[in-house]
Amino acid sequence: MSKQTQRRLVIVGGGTAGWITAAAFARLLGPSLSIHLVESDAIGTVGVGEATIPQIIRLNTILGFDENDFLKQTYGTFKLGIEFVDWGKKGDRYLHTFGDAGLNLANVPFHHYWHRASQTGADTKDLWHYSLHQLAAAQGRFSKLDRVGNTAMTGLAYAYHFDASLYAQYLRKYSEARGVTRHEGIVSAVQRDGESGDIASITLEGGAEIHGDFFIDCTGFRALLMGQELGVSYQDWSKWLPCDRAQAVPSERLDSLPPFTRATAKDAGWQWRIPLQHRTGNGHVYSSGFTTDEAAHDVLMEGLETKALADPRPIRFTTGRREEFWSHNCAAIGLSSGFLEPLESTSIHLIQSHVSRLIQLFPQSANADAERAEYNRRCAAEFEQIRDFLILHYHQTEREDSEFWRYCKNMKVPDSLTRKRELFASSGRLGRDVDDLFREASWVQVMLGQGIIPDGHDPMADAISDTQLSEFLGNLRTIIERSVGGLSTHQDYIAKHCAASQMAS
């Protein structure tokens, strides 16, 4: 397609959202589009999305990134899951891993066999005793492992921790090399078509005008195009997810690099710890209705394991989503589309999934009513599924030691979550939606980790004898121990394959 017939895509806002969008469109639709990105160095980004889930590997693969180079440039580390501390009750801890525990047998999920053994007293170990990821995380080990020996057990599923601002720079370099034009400036006005209401152009301070056929709002919480200009309303979900503020602070590097994120419950929220090669990312997510900013600051600083490198940076937000994610000729990507707190590291995934969905449904003409409706339907469903998964962490608790936790324990939750909880509590089964981001293994780990022990199990798990079940469980543990014993330490793996240049010296 010639330059004269190219359509103009204008991305307003940079950061992780803007540059993921630019990179993906340039890679997949580049020949048919003239892509422009407008950002200002004077406007900061939230930049706390340093932990991810495995879907990011697909994005990086599509873009053709070399994994080791990407991790070197972003001071990245590997992540096998998220450790939750003090959530179900004080003293509890469990790892929501990216992999399955044990091994399914005869199409019956492993947790049913484990539950059968635990209920009869034949096995006193918890589910994570049979988790490859749990044992590797506990020992601080990581290596590439696609499959466990000659068994049907899959190997280590993983994601990354990295510096989000450096990832945006990495994506920017990639995008500009593929023809994306960056414009420095602050938007001062938006022009719309008087008949259709579509956005026709934006004007920057200084007078430069940028025309476009389609616009993407990556302006963060400001939602300059989608919220302020097009007036798309916002669904407030704070009655279910009451945390509305965060304070983030970097601290010195940990002595060793654990291959997992940690989320520790506090009296009015929770605190994250993300290990990077050069520093540790920390933050306290909390509800202003149950604590003060000053008290939250103190909780954050007292919970640091290493010396702070800066003063905490405050962030305010309202959990929820836009009523529409695509309105007129504009789509919102990133924080402008909604916000689900970083408890399960889904922020960057939502950018990625929305970009992928928009590319699949990108309009060929001005009449895009069908594509717009389908995009909005699928984005809304994804937001609501993730919302329910996050609510589960707060609501399924025995904690009543603070006003915050009493509220969370007793709040009325969406019916969609209640159905899942009741079904699992009854039989260990899950009524998971087929397009749910979180796998059955994820729901099982959080349900069990938060204290839901099913009354029963799948009767098909009774098809083997007690002796066979005992042998099955024992053999699994032996295989897992042997496999983890062959892995290098996480720290050694990084030093050998992807140490940042400043860290390798």
Image (cartoon, rainbow, N blue to C red):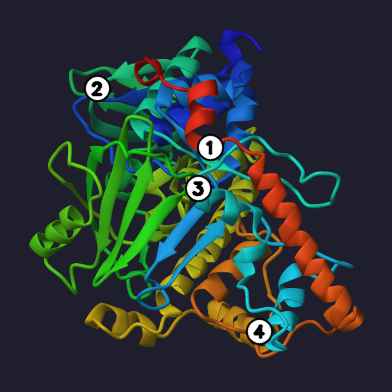
Q: Residues within 10 Å of mark 4 (few under 14, many from 20)?
A: some
| 385 over 28 or under it: above or below | below
- The residue that disc 3 covers is 350
Tell us which disc is closer to us: 4 or 3. 4
| 218 over 246 or under it: above or below | above
- The residue that disc 2 covers is 185
Q: Amino acid at mark 4?
A: Leu
- The residue that disc 4 covers is 423
Tell us which disc is closer to us: 1 or 2. 1
Among the two numbered marks 1 and 2 on one chain, the one whose residue lies closer to the N terminus: 2
Left or right: residue 288 compared with residue 491: left
Q: Are marks 3 and 1 in contact (CB under 8 Å)?
A: no
Q: Residue furthest left?
A: 294
CA gap between label 3 and label 1 equals: 31 Å
Q: Amino acid at mark 2?
A: Gly
Tell us which disc is closer to us: 3 or 1. 1
What secondary structure is found at the residue carrying circle 1? loop
Q: Amino acid at mark 1?
A: Thr
Residue 141: give x, y in percent of width and height. 55, 42
Q: Residues within 10 Å of mark 2 (few under 14, many from 20)?
A: some
CA gap between label 1 and label 4 equals: 39 Å
What secondary structure is found at the residue carrying circle 4? helix
Among the two numbered marks 4 and 3 on one chain, the one whose residue lies closer to the N terminus: 3
What secondary structure is found at the residue carrying circle 3? helix
Front-lying residue, 444 or 336: 444
Among the two numbered marks 1 and 4 on one chain, the one whose residue lies closer to the N terminus: 4
Image point 64% across, 28% down: which residue?
62
Q: Are marks 2 and 4 in contact (CB under 8 Å)?
A: no
